[in-house]
Amino acid sequence: MRKSVAYLAGLALLLTAMLGSASAAELPTDLSSLSGPSAATGAEGVFSEVLHADGTYKALFEDDDSPIPVEARDVVGEVTACVDDAHSLWGWRESNVHGWHLNTSSIPSGLNASSVLEAATAASDTVTTAGNSCGRTDAVAAQAKYMGPTTAGTNIAPSGVCGERDGRSVVGFGPLDNGSLAVACVWYSTTSRPWEVLESDVRISSGHFAFFVDRPVGCSNRFDLESILAHERGHTFGLGHVSEKDHGALTMSEKTSPCSTNARTLGLGDVVGLEALY
Ligand SMILES: [Zn+2]
C-alpha cells in the first residue's frame, strides 16, 4: 500500500512536470491517455517526445513504463539558469559510450551538412561534459561518440511513432506530420534499475525551414538546431523535464523559444541532474 501511494505520488510529480502549470484538478484521470505509441516489448520501455511548432516539448511514455522521477526539486520565484538547481530524472541512464550516427544524406539543402554535424556534436558534448556558463567544472562521466555518417533512417515514423529499434542511434531528417518540428525516441531496458539506454534516435523535420545552425540576422520563428539537440541529448542521458513556468531558463524545461540559443549551454539544474546520474 505504501509503495503504491509512493508510486502515485511519483506519477503525480511526473504529470505535473509534463503538464507544466496545470493544477492537480486538470490532470487526466484516465492514464491510458498517456499510453505510448508502440506495443510493450517485454523488459523494454520507450520514451518519445514531439517538439511542436510553438516550441513546446510534449513527452509520452508507455503505460507500464511510466518513470517515476527519482529526484525532483522545485524552486519558488524567478531564478536564473545558474541559480536554479531544479532537475528531474526519469529513471534511465547510459552506462556505455553513447555511439551515434548522422544521416547526412537526409540533411535538407537549406542547411550546411558539416554545420549540422558540428551542431549535433556540440549538443552531445554539452551534455557529456556538463557544458555550462555557470563556472561549474565537469564532474559528469557520461560519454558519447560520433560513429560516422549513415544512410540508415531513424526508427521514427512521420506520424511521430517510435518504431522497432535497430540498435543504431541515428540523428536524421525526414518528413513529420502535423507540423511537428522534431521527434525523439529513447528505448531502454527495464530489467533492473536504473534502466539502461538501448538506443536514442532523433528525427528532425525536413519539411520546412524551421531550424538554423547559425542564427540569421533578423531571425524570426526559427529554432536553434543545437539547442533542440542538446535538450534531446539530455533525455538520452536520463534527464527529465522541469516546468517551463518555474524553470524556463534551464535546457530541460518544457519549451524553447524561437531564435533563442540559450539551451546550447546547460543551467545549474541540468548539470546537477547529470552529476546525480554520472
Ligand atoms: Zn524534452
Image: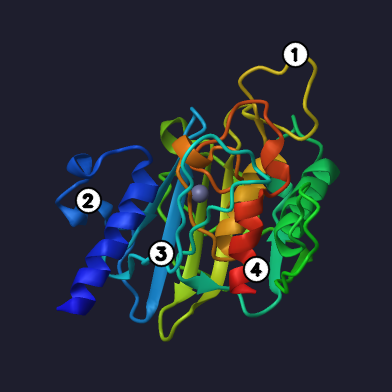
Q: Which dot marks residue 113?
A: none
Mark 4 nearby-residue class (10 Å; few <14, some 14–19, many ≥20): some
CA separation, marks 1 and 3? 40 Å
Which residue is denoted by mark 4 in the rendering? 275
Which residue is denoted by mark 2 in the rendering? 33
Vertical order, 151 against 188 (above or below): above
Question: Which comes before the other along the chain, label 2 or label 1?
Answer: 2
Q: Quadrant of the rendered structure where residue 227 is?
A: top right
Q: Which of the two discs, 3 and 2, sits closer to the camera?
A: 3
Tell me the quadrant of the picture where the N terminus can be found: bottom left
Question: Which comes before the other along the chain, label 2 or label 4?
Answer: 2
Asked if the residue at tag 1 contacts the one at tag 2, i.e. Cβ–Cβ closer than 8 Å, the answer is no
Task: Measuring from the top left, give residue 45's x and y in whole percent.
Answer: 39, 71
Residue type at tag 1? Gly
Mark 1 nearby-residue class (10 Å; few <14, some 14–19, many ≥20): few
Which residue is denoted by mark 3 in the rendering? 69
Q: Which dot marks residue 218?
A: 1
